[in-house]
Image: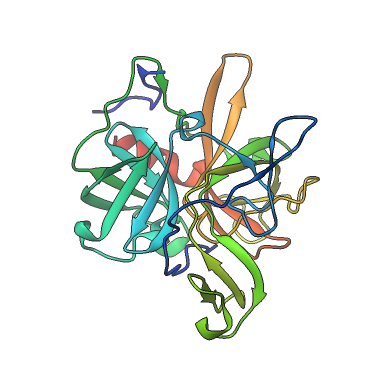
């Protein structure tokens, strides 16, 4: 079925091996003036991010055993994520979770130009989600990356908790945390979805395939391990629509965060709807 992916059916490479799943969230402090949750340094998806609800951009968590990535529902049965999260060819190795409901996988698709840097894949769910009549999926449109430069986007992720410690092996980390040797820091998965607002800047290497986020932003936010595959969403306030413009690819937790641009993947996604 070929159609634009806007449905009204109802309302870093950063995916690292994160070896223990959280049993629950620690209690959070609340700002007495605003009533909003205060995000601690050790409780982070998007670093210092604002808590988000999955239905804001149809965001899911993607699990391969205990390894965590993020994704976005394109429809009740298809999930957009990063191809580098899809390291296994066995569908039984993956579970997708949306709003507390788990789904198994029936098919794994990877963009044909993954080797050229188009780090995007699609997971087909064995059983579609049952979603209410006002659900909106962010649109996928074919458009040049140049038009995004300087625009503000909201990016989502189920990134890892950062215990704040440096490491060279798991022995250096607290119980339940894993040493991500590429970053020499200790992390573990989180069940908390967070978001941040970022300005799109040009990628110096492949500006027609990738774009970068201007990080850290004014709120000290950036992406973390586990945010891979998470969507960056552009709001079209004139028409009240949301557009997925990027899929998180990689970051270094300080001053670099790279996304695969819709320019590189939109036509393929639309052809595989």
Would residue 45 be found to the left or right of residue 122 on screen?
A: right
The colour scheme is rainbow
Residue 136 vs residue 120, the one in the foreground: 136
Residue 252, image quadrant? bottom right
Please, is residue 105 above or below residue 252 in the view? above
The residue drawn where x is 63% and y is 14% is 238
Residue 91, image quadrant? bottom left
Residue 272, image quadrant? top left
Would residue 26 be found to the left or right of residue 31 on screen?
A: left
The residue drawn where x is 61% and y is 74% is 183
The residue drawn where x is 71% and y is 50% is 221
Question: Disc count in the image?
Answer: 0
Would residue 12 be found to the left or right of residue 78 on screen?
A: right
Q: Position of residue 84 (x, y in %)?
A: 41, 62
The residue drawn where x is 53% and y is 44% is 193
Residue 67 vs residue 199, the one in the foreground: 67
Q: Position of residue 163 (x, y in %)?
A: 62, 67
Which quadrant is home to the N terminus? top left
Q: Position of residue 132 (x, y in %)?
A: 33, 19
Would residue 180 be found to the left or right of residue 34 on screen?
A: left
Q: Position of residue 230 (x, y in %)?
A: 50, 47
Which quadrant is home to the C terminus? top left
Residue 269 vs residue 237, the one in the foreground: 237
């Amino acid at each position: 079925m070929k159609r634009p992916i806007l449905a009204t059916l109802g309302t870093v490479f950063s995916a690292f091996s994160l070896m223990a799943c959280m049993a629950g969230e620690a209690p959070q402090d609340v700002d007495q003036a605003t009533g909003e949750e205060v995000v601690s340094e050790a409780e982070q998806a998007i670093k210092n991010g604002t808590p988000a609800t999955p239905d804001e951009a149809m965001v899911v968590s993607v699990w391969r055993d205990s390894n965590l990535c993020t994704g976005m529902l394109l429809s009740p049965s298809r999930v957009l994520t990063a191809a580098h999260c899809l390291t296994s060819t066995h569908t039984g190795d993956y579970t997708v979770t949306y709003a507390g409901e788990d789904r198994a996988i029936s098919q794994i698709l990877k963009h044909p130009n993954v080797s050229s840097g188009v780090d995007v894949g699609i997971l087909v769910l064995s059983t579609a989600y049952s979603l209410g009549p006002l659900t909106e999926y962010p649109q996928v449109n074919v458009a040049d990356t140049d038009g995004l430069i300087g625009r503000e986007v909201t990016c989502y992720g189920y990134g890892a908790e950062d215990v704040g410690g440096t490491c060279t092996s798991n022995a250096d980390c607290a119980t339940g945390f894993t040493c991500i040797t590429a970053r020499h820091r200790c992390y573990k998965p989180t069940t908390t979805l967070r978001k941040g607002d970022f300005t799109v800047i040009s990628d110096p290497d492949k500006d027609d395939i990738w774009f970068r986020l201007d990080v850290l932003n004014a709120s000290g936010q950036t992406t973390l391990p586990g945010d891979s595959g998470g969507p960056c969403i552009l709001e079209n306030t004139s028409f009240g629509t949301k557009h997925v413009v990027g899929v998180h690819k990689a970051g270094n937790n300080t001053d670099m965060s790279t996304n695969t641009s819709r320019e590189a993947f939109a036509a393929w996604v639309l052809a595989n709807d």
